[in-house]
Image (cartoon, coloured by chain):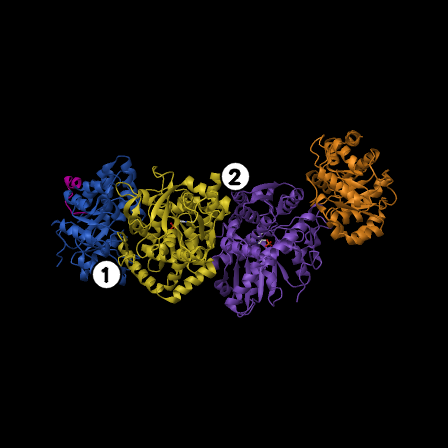
Chain colours: A yellow, B purple, C orange, D blue
Amino acid sequence: MLQAFPDIKGRFGDFGGKYVPETLMGPLQELEEALDEAMADPEFQNEYHHVLKEYAGRPTSLTYADKISEHLGGAKIYLKREDLNHTGAHKLNNAIGQALLAKRMGKEKIIAETGAGQHGVASATVAAKFGLECIVFMGEEDIRRQELNVFRMKLLGAEVVSVSSGNGTLKDATNEAIRYWVANCEDHFYLIGSVVGPHPYPRMVRDFQRIIGDESRRQFLEVEENLPDRIYACVGGGSNAMGMFYPFLQDDSALVGVEAAGKGIDTPEHAATLSKGTPGVIHGSLTYLMQDDNGQITEPYSISAGLDYPGIGPEHAHLFQTKQVRYEAVTDQEALDALKLLTQTEGIIPAIESAHALAQAFKEAGSMEADETILINLSGRGDKDMATLMEHFQEEV
Amino acid sequence: MLQAFPDIKGRFGDFGGKYVPETLMGPLQELEEALDEAMADPEFQNEYHHVLKEYAGRPTSLTYADKISEHLGGAKIYLKREDLNHTGAHKLNNAIGQALLAKRMGKEKIIAETGAGQHGVASATVAAKFGLECIVFMGEEDIRRQELNVFRMKLLGAEVVSVSSGNGTLKDATNEAIRYWVANCEDHFYLIGSVVGPHPYPRMVRDFQRIIGDESRRQFLEVEENLPDRIYACVGGGSNAMGMFYPFLQDDSALVGVEAAGKGIDTPEHAATLSKGTPGVIHGSLTYLMQDDNGQITEPYSISAGLDYPGIGPEHAHLFQTKQVRYEAVTDQEALDALKLLTQTEGIIPAIESAHALAQAFKEAGSMEADETILINLSGRGDKDMATLMEHFQEEV
Amino acid sequence: MLTKTSFQGKLNKTENLFIPFVVAGDPSPEYTIEFALRLQEQGADVLELGVPYSDPLADGPTIQRAAKRALNAGMSLRKAIQLVPELRKHGVEIPVVIFTYYNPVLQIGHQDFFNLLEENGVEGVLIPDLPFEESEEVRNMAVKKDVEFISLVAPNSDTRIQQIAEHARGFLYCVSSLGVTGGSSGMSAEALTFIKKVKEHSQVPVAVGFGISTNEDVKLVREHADGVIIGSKIIRLIEAELDVIEKGQKEEALESFTKGIQELVRD
Amino acid sequence: MLTKTSFQGKLNKTENLFIPFVVAGDPSPEYTIEFALRLQEQGADVLELGVPYSDPLADGPTIQRAAKRALNAGMSLRKAIQLVPELRKHGVEIPVVIFTYYNPVLQIGHQDFFNLLEENGVEGVLIPDLPFEESEEVRNMAVKKDVEFISLVAPNSDTRIQQIAEHARGFLYCVSSLGVTGGSSGMSAEALTFIKKVKEHSQVPVAVGFGISTNEDVKLVREHADGVIIGSKIIRLIEAELDVIEKGQKEEALESFTKGIQELVRD
Ligand SMILES: Cc1ncc(COP(=O)(O)O)c(C=O)c1O
Ligand SMILES: Cc1ncc(COP(=O)(O)O)c(C=O)c1O
């Protein structure tokens, strides 16, 4: 039996904790109590699963990718189709869980941070659905780059606050969301979008995302009567990966987390937190992060906005340290190649984030045996990336 | 017991048939035989349903729209979530069925027509998935307007042929696709996107879309133990509506098809084929259409590209004539208002096409009793319409 | 034994037929009359008078362009039919077949349509999107009104070839993918087999039309079929004169057009 | 009975404390020294020397801007600590508290960090993102090195107020949402209750800091607490001089800054 993480101090081994301004210690305590109580309440569980089924479209499909398997000539490849979720990515699972919790706690206003806008859209969506007010913090640079998602959030009724501090990207939006929460914690619920942040967020988000792995496990056993030999997921903050991996932690399946190597992990332009970062504190949690010698957090780079984050969830740091999960890094170009290959062989345009997981799996599949199996978490659809893809592929297609 | 339509001549009462150049009579015959044989083959049925479940994401959810129901203060409103299908609309159900049939017939090339690009994307998708070549005909005006979907089709590996004849919109793309089929019917399968065209297309597309109604019926009975009092669907060519209505034709549920009234059915700019058109032949089928005194087909108008079609499936013409279905028309503005209302109360951004069905249902819901129920077919998601919506709502949100 | 070819007694030969196609009103009704006269001069046996349609789905780009020009000039099915007496007045004596898509016919109504044909002395009608299975009522009316209903038959008409051929009136339009690849290759074996099969069952002349655009094509068709139908090529000859017509130089245009026809159909 | 306030014996009063905050290196280390001297002249009892950080999530826009200026000027945690002997050299005698986020501390390492503090004669340290539950090791080291570890306490610290207050050293930083809405309204009842509760359990002076930006705020705080902490307002006074500093007019800048401080803290 594995030790249950996080421990009572919110630690996953050496990582995690609550490195936050004193003002947030009360709200985090309140959140933790409400969460524990809710998760133990069958009524809450029922409501959460009811919304997932009747609103979000779960269970999402498990697709056997016959053509790509054949093309690569090795292991059988299965895709967990989080792209089929309402709003187009796994992000909604967590947003639903937290929104239900916020309602239960009597909070009528939610705060969210967003980079590419996926979590912002998911938050604005649940806010509309559950009648909550919603403020989304987004870097001014990202607002410029993701005009469409900004409009989508506004159409959903959310207020989008432009963050000009720092470089105006996700890290800064998160800082600003935390600051706003500090000042307004009385009646606001902060709906974090990944398994990051202070305890109990990493645990909570994981537990609202583990539906991915729970379903996959059941579906996989139905069609293959065996668990997958290897499971791949991309890692930004790490929520889709934790959600997928968690229910398999005690099994024999090899787990592979895939980070963004951007223009190469030997260049300064990447977001490969575990591959190249060092332990430190970011957004309230002790984990790995990208920083300079003085402990200043550095700007990450990835073509995929959802992986363009200098930290990573503390549970991943722990799984990295204990070698329970293998972490690899995949470049922009490799991800784009994998995206195109999947699109043209399976008729599925994945999110560029998800394409990182695909790329690593595709690299490895060919040298596996025909009776081995691979499960890849397709965390989201590529619709949001069309502008980027047009830029890159316009000449080719 | 209702008479089974279409009859042996491909007629739905007075409507339907095969008004095509002689060269297509052979291919249509071949198609009909292959279709009959396939539909009767449990293996084909299994494969079709397998792909729907493991690839397309079916069954799609039935969502109880509690907030909008409360807001309108009348009937309970349920949404059939075709927006959750892979590629974002009901169109894929049909594309999958026809692609499987094409493969079974040994055709390795498919032809499709598209207006907004939804059916083109669905066709390109199944072509990739099943290893077929795909040529999509699209009006040059539509290509200009739907740049993103054009790119998506190309990324999926399809060839997109620009059609400059006529006004360069859907009607002309369909003409051109038919012409191309005439010349290449030997080894090409024409994958029509709605319940239009010569027999057996209207029947085939209906039968590949009736999964919508079949699922809805079962799901509705599970949650309400009664069938819906009224069922709404938008009508362009009419495939999502036929798919939804068909399994309910013998029930007491009132069926309501909603056409696009554009800028008003008393203006020249609308696409309300049944409300304002007259019987005639279009794209191989005898049905209602919009035409001038000389029998020249006129250009329709609707803000929603998917409803911007001067004809309608012959089965709808029949259901209109026999009053089995009530047909209403909804303006651009009413559809946009309904779209915004649903977005902000339920967190679902519908396709503008689907918003026409919503608008009509919302108009009627308030004056219904609290124990009455409404089912609306949400045929697709609004992602494809963001540019249009930005133009219309930019100042409001 | 070609008993069913009469065109009200006006067609007095059953082989080596030259059947040109023009679009009524392209570029104007006046010019249609002029072109018809020139074609008759050059030996046309039957005139196919095309009615411009908004959605001519059996036609290629050339005829689509012609239809657009004619529609812009205000042509319609009714006007096209009413153009026939004008043709007569100016000396066109060969039988005229109205070529129209089905929808305009439907709008007029079958009965009125045939009344119109009768009143205006039209000898035949061809509806490319009204195949055998959908045309029974129209065929019966045509017989009653002594209007030839021209049928089409294609290589892939398969088992229906016999049926169509046996019911054919006036002449039978073979939509043949000729397999003409160049001067020397001649007709493909499939095409020959197809024409042979059609002729076996037909009691009317079998005319071939489909992409015939050179004198060589014409000669080749003459060898094997009873008639040659030429459409797009004639439209292109008209198109070549549009600039000259625009300038009002009518005689030059017609002369040049006539030369083109001569070149096309010479023995 | 304020036994735990010693700052290595340098703080000789336990009430009416004036605790200003500046960011080391904003806009340059030289100016930090000058500002510190002026603040000491104006009665500062303890200097909070802020270390600029890339992600100062407990700070508002004013301090963020200051941090950016200082980072651009090359400041770091190590350099900020090494600035303290410079301050001494130029005459700053009041205790200095290094205010730094936790991550830079982690990168240096706890042991090396405290060695650095010791070597450079730093009297206190405040880490805004290291709450009581996470700070045990650091607090223990601080005691060993005779460095005051300054704790923060907030109105919503709730049941933890007593615990935090009892362990407080140096002074206790009350993050108070003052409820100052205007000149006349005074402190909200909640704020007063909070401060009272903190004082009950604290063995060190209780200083209040949070949005204090006018002389009226200062006076109000003095009535109820042992000290007033002023950060953003001082940064804004510095910002107001940036143009003048840019022009090299040092004396004018410092004089104007000093006037601002005088106005802020006068009785
Ligand atoms: C589709 C998709 N996948 C992955 C991610 C990365 O987040 P996480 O690592 O938390 O799953 C994002 C974030 O926006 C995303 O949109
Ligand atoms: C979302 C959506 N709904 C409806 C339609 C209209 O088609 P039909 O009437 O065949 O359902 C379209 C066509 O593109 C569509 O994309």
Q: Residue at the left extreme?
A: D9
Report how far apart the C-alphas of labels 2 and 1 lie in the structure. 62 Å
**Is residue C252 something that shows in the picture?**
yes
Q: Mark 1 lies on which chain?
A: D
Quadrant assignment, res A130: bottom left
Residue type for callout 2: Val
What percent of the width, then of the height, locates residue D2?
13, 57
Residue that badge 2 annotates: A397
| In this picture, residue D35 sits left or right of residue A348 | left
Q: Does the magenta stretch include residue D154?
A: no
What percent of the width, then of the height, locates residue B230?
58, 65
Viewer-closest of A225 and A65 = A225
Q: Nearer the viewer, mark 2 or mark 1?
A: 2
Q: What element carries label 1?
A: helix
Count of numbered marks: 2
**What stretch of residues is rendered in magenta?**
D85-97
Question: Label 2: few (<14), some or many (≥20) within 10 Å?
Answer: some
Which quarter shows the N terminus of chain A?
A: bottom left
**Is residue D177 something that shows in the picture?**
no
Disc 1 Cβ-to-ligand 1 distance below 8 Å? no
Residue type for callout 1: Arg
Marks 2 & 1 on one chain:
no
| In this picture, residue C71 sits left or right of residue B271 | right
Residue that badge 1 annotates: D160
What percent of the width, then of the height, locates residue C42?
82, 33
| In this picture, residue A286 sits left or right of residue D18 | right
Quadrant assignment, res C62: top right
The numbered disc on residue C177 is none
Q: Mark 2 lies on which chain?
A: A
